[in-house]
């Protein structure tokens, strides 16, 4: 994990449920504000932390059996990809068009 990713995790750590009076009801309101309403910057950060925490990127990926290990690795992959997107700004030379012009003439 990059230094940026680790710094992000540590800065968001106080947003976990049970820390500083943050409750499950607060988490519910934060998610609803982010996905269905107008969220504050604090709410956005807390929701991001909750998503990263659920992906368990800092935990042990080895489970009790192979099925559990694959499940953990899948969850971790989501968190790692999210962190990569958030911490690695693409360079203009690396940008690829999302659609290609199509030749629609019959010829």
Image: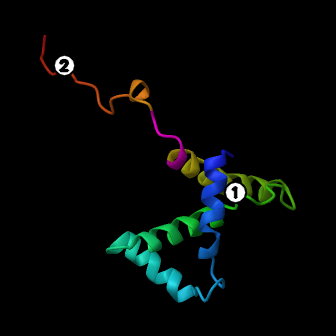
Give the image location of residue 78, x and y in percent. 60, 53
Q: Earlier in the sequence, mark 2 or mark 1?
A: 1
Q: Secondary structure at mark 2?
A: loop
Residue 38 lies left or right of residue 56; in this view the side is left
Mark seen at residue 103: 2
| Occupied quadrant, residue 107 | top left
**Whole-Å distance between the Cαs marked 2 and 1?**
45 Å
Eyeballing the image, is 96 above or below 17?
A: above
Q: Secondary structure at mark 1?
A: loop
The residue lying furthest to the top in this view is 107
The residue lying furthest to the right in this view is 64
Tell me the residue that label 1 is attached to: 57
Give the image location of residue 74, x and y in percent. 67, 53
Eyeballing the image, is 18 above or below 91?
A: below
Eyeballing the image, is 77 above or below 39?
A: above
Residue 83 lies left or right of residue 60; in this view the side is left
> What's the magenta region?
86-90
What residue do we see at 60% from left, 89% from top?
21
Give the camera-side residue of 71 and 21: 21
Q: How would you rate the neighbour count of disc 1 (Cα within 10 Å): few for under 14, some for 14-19, many for 20 or more?
A: many
């Amino acid at each position: 994990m990059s230094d940026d990713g680790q710094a992000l995790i540590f800065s968001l750590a106080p947003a976990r449920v049970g820390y500083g009076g943050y409750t499950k009801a607060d988490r519910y309101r934060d998610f609803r504000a982010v996905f269905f309403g107008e969220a504050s910057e604090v709410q956005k950060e807390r929701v991001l932390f909750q998503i990263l925490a659920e992906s368990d990127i800092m935990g042990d990926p080895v489970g009790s059996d192979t099925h559990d290990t694959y499940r953990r690795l899948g969850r971790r992959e989501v968190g790692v990809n999210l962190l990569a997107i958030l911490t690695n700004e693409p360079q203009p030379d690396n940008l690829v068009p999302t659609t290609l012009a199509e030749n629609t003439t019959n010829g």
